[in-house]
Amino acid sequence: MNAIRVALVNDYEVVVRGLEAMLRSYSDVLHVVELDASKDVGQSVDVTLYDTFAAPQGDGEEVRQLAANPLSGKVVVYTWDLDPAKASAALANGASGYLSKGLTAGQLATALQDLHRGGSDAPVLLEGSAKTIGGDWPGREEGLTQREAEVLALITQGLSNAAIADRTGLSPNSVKTYIRSCYRRIGVSSRSNAVLWGIDHGFRPDRRRLAPPAE
């Protein structure tokens, strides 16, 4: 059986490269052929994995556009937000799967294979543990957790606390908690300084199509 051709999509290069590294041990069954940072899928693939880090969730227009692209194959949303309503909206937008970021790399690889083998009427919805298993994100080397980094990325993009809560599925109080802990880690005390820090440390979205590392 040929390896499943996979495209990885997110607004940040470090995120898609981290996801590619997470799946590298499964290259015999998953062939990552394209990494897209704020770009449309540009070649025919079997599965497009849409990482929601600092991006609209599966109920947004982005997933609808991905699913409408004939090159995308089956679109899978990869997210922390396991709200059943968001999952249903993602499937209504054309997604074929809705997967938790708490899945291990092996569980993620298996889910993508199951989805590829199944028919279009057999969507995959899987939950995992409550903590990050793998991948990468901006600010990780500075000690930021994935959730802190995501909130900082959205602050850097200019979103308000209410918009961040809506985008991430976090409560307003949780957003405030992540902002405070983020500020402590990066040594700032104001939103404007956090934005400047974010700009200087790679928290603005990228826009490019990337080639996977040569095998």
Image (tube, grey):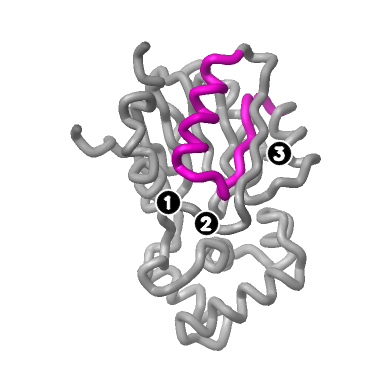
Q: Tell me if 45 is positioned left or right of 158 in this view.
A: left
Name above or below for residue 119 compared with residue 192: above
Name above or below for residue 161 compared with residue 23: below
Q: Quadrant of residue 157?
A: bottom right
Name above or below for residue 90 compared with residue 73: below
Q: CA distance from mark 1 to mark 3?
A: 23 Å
Which segment did they paint magenta?
93-118
Q: Count neighbours of disc 1 (C-alpha within 10 A) and say few if under 14, some if 14 to 19, many if 20 or more.
A: some
Is residue 28 something one can see in this rendering? yes
Judge depth for marks 1 and 3 and give the one in front: 1
Q: Count neighbours of disc 2 (C-alpha within 10 A) and say few if under 14, some if 14 to 19, many if 20 or more.
A: some
Q: Are marks 2 and 3 in contact (CB under 8 Å)?
A: no
Looking at marks 1 and 3 on the same chain, the residue that comes earlier in the sequence is marked by 3
- Residue identifier under label 1: 135
Q: Quadrant of residue 61?
A: top right
Looking at marks 2 and 3 on the same chain, the residue that comes earlier in the sequence is marked by 3
Q: Are marks 1 and 3 in contact (CB under 8 Å)?
A: no
Q: Considering the image in quadrants, where does the C terminus appear?
A: top left
Q: Position of residue 2 (x, y in %)?
A: 35, 14
**Labelled disc at residue 59:** 3
Q: Are marks 1 and 2 in contact (CB under 8 Å)?
A: yes
**Labelled disc at residue 132:** 2
Q: Position of residue 170 (x, y in %)?
A: 71, 61
Q: CA distance from mark 1 to mark 2?
A: 8 Å
Which residue is pictured at 36% across the width and 41% down the height?
20
Name above or below for residue 206 compared with residue 8: below
Q: Tell me if 175 is positioned left or right of 41 in this view.
A: right
Secondary element under disc 1, as helix, strand or loop, is loop
